[in-house]
Amino acid sequence: VMLGSTVINHQQHVGLQKLAALAGVTHSYLGPDKNLKFIQDDTSGGSALVCSCFRVLENLELTCAVGQLVYETVQAHQKVYNTGSGCLLFLAGAWSRAVLECLQRGISVSHIISAMSEGMDICLDVFRKYSISTDGLGVVQSESWTETSHGFGLQLSKKPIKAVSQAMDHLQGTGNAGHKPPNTGGQRKIKLSRHFCEAKSRNVSAASQPKPLNVAHIAEGLTHGCVSAMKLVVEINQIQSKNHRNISCSAFDIIKVVTCVLPGLPEDQSCVLPGCIVLLSAEQALVAHDLQEQHLKVALINGDLSDSFCHLGFRRPAGMQHVKSKMPLSSSKEEEWMVTVLALLLKLEVNLILISGLANQKMIQRCCRHRILVVERVKASVLKAFADDSGGVPVTYVTQLNKQCVGTQAKILIWRDLGSTGTEFSTAVNISSGANSGLATVILTSCVHGKLQALEDQFWSCAYRLHHALIDKSVLPGGGVIEMLCIHHLQKQAGQCTEGAANPYRGVVLCLMADGLIDYITTVMFNTGRLSKVKARTLVSQQLQDFNGHVGTAAKFSQLFLDSGTEDTAFISTVKPVRAPPMTIYDNVSVKQEAWRKALDLVFLVLQTDAEIITGIDQRTDGFIF
Amino acid sequence: MARLVRKSPSLCTDLPLDNDDISTKLNLLRKLLTSCFGPTGKLKQVHNNVGGHVVTTSTSSVLLPAVSSSQPFVNLIKTSILNHVSRFSDCGLFAAALCLALTERAKQSGLGGNVAIGLNQHLLSLCVGYLQRDDCGCKVKLDFCSSQNLMTLARSVISSKPACVLTEQETLHLSRLAVQAFLLTVPCDSPGTVTLGRTVTVPVEGHSVLNSAVFPGLLVDITDAIYPIKAGTLNSNLLCTVLFSASLAGDLSELGDGIIEVHDGADPDSQILDQLLEIGKQVVKDEVKLFLCQKVIHPVLQQYLRSQGIIVIERLGMSLMEPLIQMTGAQPVAALHTTLPVKAYGKVRELTLRQFGSKTMLQLHPPGESAICTMVLCHRNETMLSELKVVCLKTEHVLRLTLREPSALLGGGCTETHLAAYIRHKSMSKAAETALELGCSQTEYHLGTEVFCRSLESVAAALEHNGGNSLIDLTHAHHWILPADVMREYGEESFGFCGCGLVESSPSKRWTYLNTNYTEFSPESLCGNATQQPRVLDSFVAKLNALQVAVETANLALDVRYIIQDVN
């Protein structure tokens, strides 16, 4: 096979145009009011109901290089944050339109890049300046909401600034280490690890005075339109914080959360339960019934429960031949294995086996007969939680089990009978490790099977929003406020351009960048369905004109935004003529920051690319073949 | 039935450089590679035609392997450049740009092949001779008493790859880390032959570049370990360590594909496991506290070792083995002998758990002074991170090369323009004699010199990608760039500094465009003048070799008379 590679030259910036076009698919997913999309595959006839930017990209076949790059970026973002992908892609599109405009005006690539990086710094600075510490947030809120919403400025956290200065200290420290000449004995004295240890211990001492956190209030602010999903998240937090009251009241351990999807039930039956809910077949359910209300001995197996199972990395030699000297016995190898395993399990008095992989069907049945319940496909985090609480040790092979490995005090509770819902499973059972493990299961239900995926995605994005807010220990004023502040600062900076500066196009580029954000806000407003695009734009520009850079004014804007925003408030205001106190909306600091930066990174990468090199066997004719 | 297929005759190309197809391909290759050159270079997206992973890069070591050609002539040049890159890491694009420019210009000039080759050789030796002189005007002596120059060198390498998408602050942070890692790998007070240590790079995706850091010792990824490792419990004493390079998975896979006959009743799996447990018992007896394996360890053995209080880490991977051996002093055990020699054991001082986002790492501290360190590189996405990794490896290499020759060359195109001015001046002074010596006419001599100098200058000019103009000043012969979108009225005062940042523009300075003729002059050296520090530096060793590779490859290309291809 002859290899060839092709170079495709981009005359105008095709890459940026592709990026802008691809970003178009995200428009309807922005903001609290989302529209679902159907993706249909003409060749196979299959279809998918999608409700987030990430799921759209997942379902599209992206073959071009820009598409691949976008997908990889969004995937990486989704993996860590589970939310904000739509914002990422929208801004990538909006800013690539801004860059195209710059290119058309003859601004050089290096000037575009330097000005836009500066613009990003301005925005991140705004984030830092206006971020609200979660400490004590919402405590004042319950007494009088007006005070808080207008008094954001007073509550601005000092923490991020401190963290930044700490980081700077740290930088300085490493810099010094770099300056030391290599041949003097003093060089070894300065070790990075020391600086790290110091920084860490300082951080710990800073965090050691916990203030009461109003998690429910923070969660409410982070709802972003997914009211029912966020309600479930708050319930989980209540379950978990009940258990961790002594340690820390803000505990939200996302690793110990499991989702369980039940089709065929109405959506309002979604709920949260402590422990781990698993679905069992009729035969297993009988065993579960017997084992209810008992302290059970539990075995944890990190692998499959089968005689042919080998641990990862074990390769069975291909050319193994067994020389048989006598007639094979009646019992097969599998049978022999089952007998040994069962004897072992009975000896150890195991009642419950949790397996991360699959189990041999015959083995499950045999276990059932001896009143041993086998649960397959258990998440690794659940195994770990059981190991921590019940004192069991996960093993790879069932034959490894011994007295020390078996955990105690596990419990089984029949949760509900599923006989009527038409699934292959008959019963849902709650397994818990006895102690307050913090394990929680979210039951997601829907009569529409295709919607379950969207519900699950929504739940996880809410969960991660709260999770990241608690990690960041701060939030941003949401509902468009932070964007407005960024636009305001960008435009202000753009106006302050001095003649003869290093970059004569700084002002233009910053303005175009701000336009991208205006585009973002207006799209979100448009998605509420109460405003036309034009109306939304006029509203935004009016606000910007009246805007004096004070957070209070921005907050007012957010109320305005909100009135036409979330369904609940709108509902309330129609029912009651007297305005109910509108809730505050928050955004995540790290999620937003990373989404914006990743969007700009994407634009920069594509902007600076002038050629595609396609390797492999070439079938195209429009490129140049080496 | 035997079937005879007639062999097709070999394909012979006469004078390949005159061949249209080949010269277009070479021209395209030149454009492709020069467009990547420098900090404002254009990026290339490399992917396969079935929609695989996209690599965005402007680094020659990533780009060139992707450019595969059916034309042996193109591959000849490609291989030569890649050879240089594999040995010196840096200056691959410089070598490629110079080589292809020289070849193209020599062909266009109409000089006879032999004359051009002889002249190039002569001019190359002039260049090399000049660069190695102590009073060379484009060379900076590196002073190891200050990290200033090392930082500049590191920064120049890191900032030359825009696909890393770094801010000024991030570039500075990484330059510091690179220099710091380099200094950590230079052993402090070991007598006798000094062996340089190693920097192991650990990439972490999804985090800010400013979270990148350098640690002494090694960091092992234990994110996927299901058994919690309690570090810090044993940190009072040195940990006795054993290191296996053999697989302890308990399989027979290393026996190859042959057929094994096993008697019924015999169970090879359990027999191997018994053997493994024997090893475990010995290790416990010898009071080993840390059990490391490059490959997989059988779960049963792991369980046994853990129950004895030993910390077990498997699947270390090939790349960590060398540094682990260097750091711990352990001999890797490659066979499953029951008796482990005592001298095979190594030492680790203590263990620390470190968390980088979703990654959990175990830091193994060296038992004493050790030149092993780990650099954790963070970046926001995979594309930029993979480029950053390549760039950091390159920086490490470039810094190491300074130990071989403690000098650096001025960057930003200044070395090229300076060298060209020097060659023009030098060759003019003894034109007649040298021409006679080389056996060519004086006209040919001048023409050849012009080809050589113009090629060098074209490489300097290739640093500009936004339509700006390249200029040279007529005193120091440094390289200056006049951006395309700078307002005309500012004129030449808006220059600021030259490419390397050593010369500042002043009203008394005179400039000329790079592609115009200027009367030759002897470029002044700036080395005595220490008020300014250069802002861009290139590796001396790498660039010198790149220069030689470029000229020699171009000479080879000019020398090829026939290409004979067996197409069967």
Image (spheres, coloured by chain):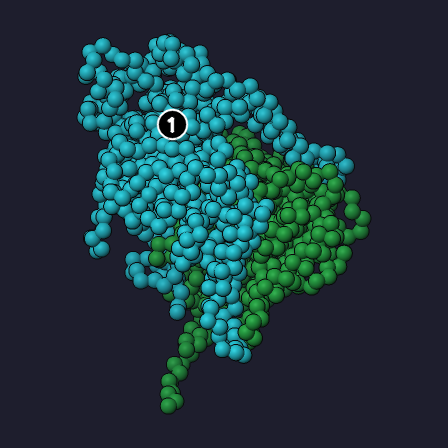
Chain colours: A cyan, B green
The one of B89 and B458 positioned closer to us in this rendering:
B89
Quadrant of the rendered structure where residue A606 is?
A: top left
**Quarter of the image where the N terminus of chain A is located:** bottom left
Whether residue B441 is visible: no
The image shows residue A478 at horizontal and vertical percentages of 35, 23
> What residue is shown at x 64% (from left), y 31% (from top)?
A197
Secondary structure found at label 1: helix
Outermost residue toward the right?
A: B191
Whether residue A214 is visible: yes
Q: Is residue A60 above or below residue B527?
A: below
Q: Which chain is mark 1 on?
A: A
Q: Is residue A314 above or below residue B35?
A: below
Q: Is residue B181 above or below residue A550?
A: below
The image shows residue A65 at horizontal and vertical percentages of 35, 49
The image shows residue B469 at horizontal and vertical percentages of 44, 41
Outermost residue toward the bottom?
A: B1
> What residue is shown at x 60% (from left), y 22% (from top)?
A205
Q: Residues within 10 Å of mark 1 (few under 14, many from 20)?
A: some
> What residue is shown at x 25% (from left), y 19% (from top)?
A569
**Quarter of the image where the C terminus of chain A is located:** bottom left
> What residue is shown at x 46% (from left), y 68% (from top)?
A332
The one of A97 and A358 positioned closer to us in this rendering:
A358
The image shows residue B267 at horizontal and vertical percentages of 57, 68
Tag 1: residue type?
A: Glu
Specify whether B453 is left or right of B429.
Answer: left
Residue at which label 1 appears? A235
The one of A18 and A359 positioned closer to us in this rendering:
A359
Total marks placed: 1
